[in-house]
């Protein structure tokens, strides 16, 4: 069986996509799952957060998408994360323009992942904060979308744009694309508005909303500066344990789906 491929997507910036990709990746790896992380963001935050110096790379996801290099030439290991990484850096910023005239421009990542899918249990794709061609590549390659979000006033509005994009990708490119789940990030239960938005989310999306909630936690914010997932930086922190719980919830769900 091939890997379950998840695109971690939200066009809104700073909602916790990268933090989720890195820490979920490390948590799944800790549960003995084989994980590949794909950094699809020119910011290269997931690359750095995995302990890989983005400035020093000779080959990145750019080479995979544009120059159609072999995945093995690009793949690296995250020393602390226990997972593999297809890294990214600023070079990727040019990819969008360069891809526009190319045939199969939306499915480059899907094609590239095809040959290694059997080597992994999970492939997690960290998307950039935009509904651009890079994100569309992520959505085409994925079985499902995971949507991290902060429970703020404008969050639901942004969500409807994302869902429109998912529907468009479904109609044209990837008919089986599912919504894997919505993840509440940086959550502060004392904030009344956050509670209200969280309630609305559950009303609209029911059990698509993960039961696990990621709290605001300083260990999650500082871990990337050491190039470490939070569970390596401080295993007992609230943030690390929330992501371990999330990994458990995801593994349970998938087991139920397989057994059904
Ligand atoms: P971008 O859209 O720029 O790619 P993103 O959606 O990937 O951003 P992150 O980079 O994961 O978001 O998080 C944004 C900032 O918030 C980062 O500085 C990160 O360290 C911090 N952060 C993320 N999650 C938490 C959390 N649960 N508690 C505290 N800080 C967090
Ligand atoms: Mg990010």
Image (cartoon, grey):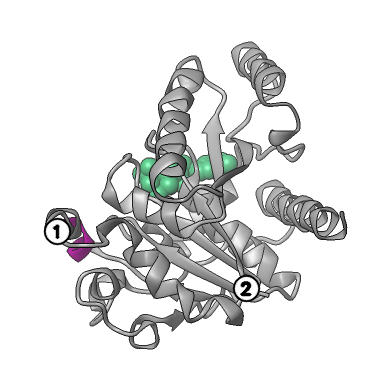
Q: Is residue 93 magenta?
A: yes
Q: Is residue 195 magenta?
A: no
Magenta region: which residues? 90-94
Residue occupying the point 59% across, 82% down: 119
Provide the major secondary structure of the magenta segment: helix
Judge left or right: residue 151 versus residue 161. Answer: right
Residue occupying the point 46% across, 51% down: 174
Q: CA distance from mark 2 to mark 1?
A: 31 Å
Q: Are marks 2 and 1 in contact (CB under 8 Å)?
A: no
Residue occupying the point 33% across, 87% down: 73
| Residue annotated with mark 2 | 2
Q: Quadrant of residue 188?
A: top right
Dot 1 beta carbon under 8 Å from ligand 1: no
Image coords of residue 197 (percent x, y): 61, 17
Image coords of residue 8 (percent x, y): 50, 49
Q: Count residues near mark 2 (Cα–Cα under 10 Å), then give few for <14, some for 14-19, many for 20+.
A: some
Q: Give the position of the N terminus as an image quadrant.
A: bottom right
| Residue annotated with mark 1 | 94
Q: Can residue 227 be seen? A: no
Q: Can residue 245 be seen? A: yes
**Which SS class for mark 2?**
loop
6 and 165: which is toward the camera: 165
Residue occupying the point 82% across, 55% down: 252
Dot 2 beta carbon under 8 Å from ligand 2: no
**Which SS class for mark 1?**
helix
Judge left or right: residue 23 versus residue 39. Answer: right
For marks 2 and 1 on the same chain, the one whose residue lies earlier in the sequence: 2
């Amino acid at each position: 069986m091939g890997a379950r491929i998840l695109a971690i997507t939200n066009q809104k910036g700073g909602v916790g996509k990268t933090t989720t990709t890195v820490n979920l990746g490390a948590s799944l790896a800790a549960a003995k799952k084989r994980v590949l992380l794909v950094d699809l963001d020119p910011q290269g935050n997931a690359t750095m957060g995995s302990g890989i110096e983005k400035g020093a790379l000779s080959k990145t996801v750019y080479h995979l998408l544009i120059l159609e290099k072999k995945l093995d030439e690009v793949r690296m290991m995250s020393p602390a994360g226990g997972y593999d990484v297809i890294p990214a850096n600023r070079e990727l910023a040019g990819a969008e323009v360069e891809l526009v005239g190319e045939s199969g421009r939306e499915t480059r990542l899907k094609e590239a992942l095809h040959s290694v899918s059997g080597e992994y249990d999970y492939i997690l794709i960290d998307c950039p904060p935009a509904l651009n061609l890079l994100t569309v590549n992520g959505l085409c390659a994925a079985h499902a979308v995971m949507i991290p979000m902060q429970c703020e006033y404008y969050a639901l509005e942004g969500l409807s744009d994302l869902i429109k994009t998912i529907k468009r990708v479904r109609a044209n490119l990837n008919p089986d694309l599912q919504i894997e789940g919505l993840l509440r990030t940086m959550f502060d239960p004392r904030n009344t508005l956050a509670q209200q938005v969280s309630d609305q989310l559950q009303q609209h999306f029911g059990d698509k909303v993960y039961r696990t909630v990621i709290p605001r936690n300083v260990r999650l914010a500082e871990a990337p500066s050491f190039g470490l997932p939070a569970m390596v930086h401080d295993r007992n922190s609230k943030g690390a344990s929330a992501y371990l719980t999330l990994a458990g919830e995801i593994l349970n769900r998938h087991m139920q789906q397989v057994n059904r």
